[in-house]
Image: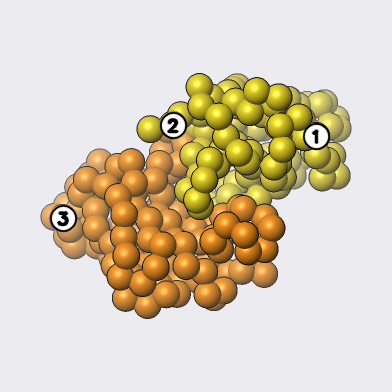
Chain colours: A orange, B yellow
Amino acid sequence: DVKVTQSSRYLVKRTGEKVFLECVQDMDHENMFWYRQDPGLGLRLIYFSYDVKMKEKGDIPEGYSVSREKKERFSLILESASTNQTSMYLCASIPPPGQGGVYGYTFGSGTRLTVV
Amino acid sequence: GQQLNQSPQSMFIQEGEDVSMNCTSSSIFNTWLWYKQDPGEGPVLLIALYKAGELTSNGRLTAQFGITRKDSFLNISASIPSDVGIYFCAGQTSGSRLTFGEGTQLTVNP
């Protein structure tokens, strides 16, 4: 089974801090995604990447950046954390269409970030 | 961007009852997926649907891909306490990107 590992389950950071959320997958997937999850809003796409050093903005990229230096690792960066970025952050990966037959994401367990 | 409307937002049921939830969209999707998220965990894929009209079962779960390709429903029969969690629908057009519904929070009382 594909494993997607997020480095921290819980984080508490101060307003203005630079925050790094790390995600690693072990199945050589090219496609990786970062979502945030808020009650009543579902999962909203922040950034995604189809290959190393490639990134594309999702629906809510403001205040975030990403880094994909290696295929297995996709990092989400909060340049200057703010209280409205308190949320659950979920990383996911998926093989390209045509591989494996099931077009579903594999999600990590999530990082619950609190900005105070 | 594309949006999915998922209902109901929450459900409180007794153990043994059947559950039904659905998603609708103004856009057509090529694939519909249903996920479940246990408390404190990431979502896990339950069922994937690839063709309009397709009806697929996975144990006590049954899901259908609407004929118009703009909707899908998920039924859970004879609910049990471990069915508790948030259920998400997701639609896919082309490529790998998914659009998610807002989620249905299910509570099952023993």
Three-letter amino acid code of the residue under disc 3: Ser
The residue beneath circle 3 is: A80
Subunit bearing disc 2: B
Q: Nearer the viewer, mark 2 or mark 3?
A: 2
Q: CA distance from mark 2 to mark 1?
A: 24 Å
**Residue under the point 42% across and 56% down:** A33
Three-letter amino acid code of the residue under disc 1: Leu
Q: Secondary structure at mark 3?
A: loop
Q: Position of residue A100 (x, y in %)?
A: 67, 63
Subunit bearing disc 1: B
Q: Position of residue A67 (x, y in %)?
A: 29, 67
Q: Is residue A4 above or below residue B17?
A: below
Q: Label 1: few (<14), some or many (≥20) within 10 Å?
A: some
Q: Label 2: few (<14), some or many (≥20) within 10 Å?
A: few
Q: Is residue A85 above or below residue A26?
A: above
**Residue under the point 24% across and 58% down:** A65
Q: Nearer the viewer, mark 3 or mark 1?
A: 1
